[in-house]
Amino acid sequence: MNSDIQGRAAHLAGIREKAEAEMAGMGIDAAFIDRLVDTFYGRIQAHPRLGPVFDGRLAGRWPDHMEKMKRFWSSVAFKNGAYGGKPVQAHLGVEGIVPDLFPEWLALFSETLADIAPSDDAKAWFMATAERIAKSLTLSLFYNPAMDDPVGKTG
């Protein structure tokens, strides 16, 4: 049993080391994660459509959210387990959240990366990751399998 635990710990350490090396090769470090989150969410707050939706949920809690997002992106990039939240549940019931906000969120994220990412590889990696996250959240929050039912469709 103890060797299983040690083996798992070594496996996880290997995953983290590989991720850290990959990120370092792109110029990504913890300072970049902080800058990305601070810059992006500063832009979110100023955005005419996204800002009110985020502020409606986070008013008075922005500093906590920023720290949570830094842990989230650190966990995604460095595979370090820093984030243990439930993103889908966190977005359920957010007033004003609609599917067409996700492309705007992605466009703002892309603009932020274009301005601050240390390399083209970093831009591509973070953008691909953000696109997967947006797709996952959109499907989780808004997908209705009944809409795919060919029997229920009228032609």
Image (spheres, grey):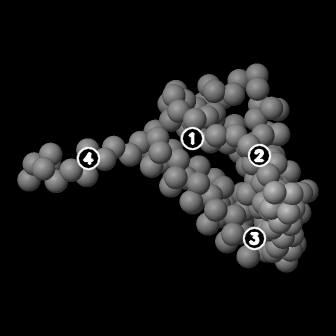
Mark drawn on residue 122: 3
Q: Which amino acid lies under the numbered mark 1 shown in the image of this protein?
A: Val
- Say whether residue 27 is left or right of residue 42: right
In the image, farthest residue toward the top: 60
Residue 68 pos. (x, y %): 78, 40
Q: Which amino acid lies under the numbered mark 3 shown in the image of this protein?
A: Ala
Quadrant where the N terminus is found in the figure? bottom right
Task: Classify mark 2: helix, strand or loop.
Answer: loop
Residue 111 pos. (x, y %): 67, 59
Which comes sooner in the sequence, label 2 or label 4? 2
The CA distance from mark 2 to mark 1 is: 14 Å
Which comes sooner in the sequence, label 3 or label 4? 3
Which comes sooner in the sequence, label 3 or label 2? 2
Residue position marked by numbered label 2 in the rendering: 83
Q: Which amino acid lies under the numbered mark 4 shown in the image of this protein?
A: Met
Tell me which residue sits at (77%, 31%) in the image. Answer: 62
Vertical placement of 62 versus 147: above or below? above
Vertical placement of 26 versus 101: above or below? below
Q: Which amino acid lies under the numbered mark 2 shown in the image of this protein?
A: Tyr
The CA distance from mark 3 to mark 2 is: 21 Å
